[in-house]
Amino acid sequence: MIGQLVRFGIVGVANTLISLAVYQLLLFAGVWYLVAAPLGYMAGLLNGYVFNRSWTFKSQDSMRARMSYVVIQMGGAGLTSLLVFLFVDAGLNRTVAFAVATVPVVICTFAANRAWTFVDR
């Protein structure tokens, strides 16, 4: 499990960089931060599925896995938005709030994906 968590973390860093870049671009384009946050988060979704399925969990591709992944990631996007809102409301910079929000979201999505998405049935 430790190896999976490390690989998930590496994929997560790549996803976070992609997400943060999209989030920043959307903010620059004038998109409201509460819309930009989940869009930024979802930008790493495809990359995350491919690399977590094939490298992190070495799991088979299936419609069930794809659907589970999307549902878990959408939950992660919602949690990201909620945390960004709370952190900004508490006085954090919008970008810092987004970065801080990723930590608990990564932990939650790792546990959910390990338990439901990438378990070959």
Image (cartoon, rainbow, N blue to C red):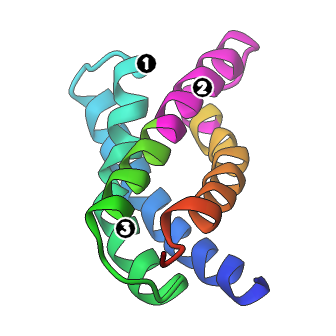
Q: Earlier in the sequence, mark 1 or mark 2?
A: 1
Closest to the observer: 58 or 19? Answer: 58
Q: What amino acid does circle 3 point to?
A: Tyr
**Magenta span: chief secondary structure:** helix
**Picture coordinates of residue 106, whole percent (x, y):** 64, 54
The answer to whether residue 13 is left or right of residue 96 is: left
Q: Foreground mark, 3 or 1?
A: 3
**Picture coordinates of residue 42, whole percent (x, y):** 35, 45
User: Does 98 appear above or below 112?
Assistant: above
Quadrant where the image shows the N terminus: bottom right
User: Does 95 appear above or below 49?
Assistant: above
Residue 98, image quadrant: top right
Name the residue located 38 percent from the left edge and 64 percent from the top edge.
65
Count residues near mark 3 (Cα–Cα under 10 Å), then give few for <14, some for 14-19, many for 20+.
many
The CA span between labels 1 and 2 is 8 Å
**Picture coordinates of residue 110, whole percent (x, y):** 64, 61
Closest to the observer: 27 or 102? Answer: 102
Quickly name the residue at label 1.
Answer: 34
Which residue lies most toward the left here? 29
Magenta stretch contains residue 86: yes
Closest to the observer: 6 or 113? Answer: 113
Point out the stretch of residues depicted in magenta. Answer: 75-96
Numbered tag placed on residue 46 in the rendering: none
Q: What amino acid does circle 2 point to?
A: Val
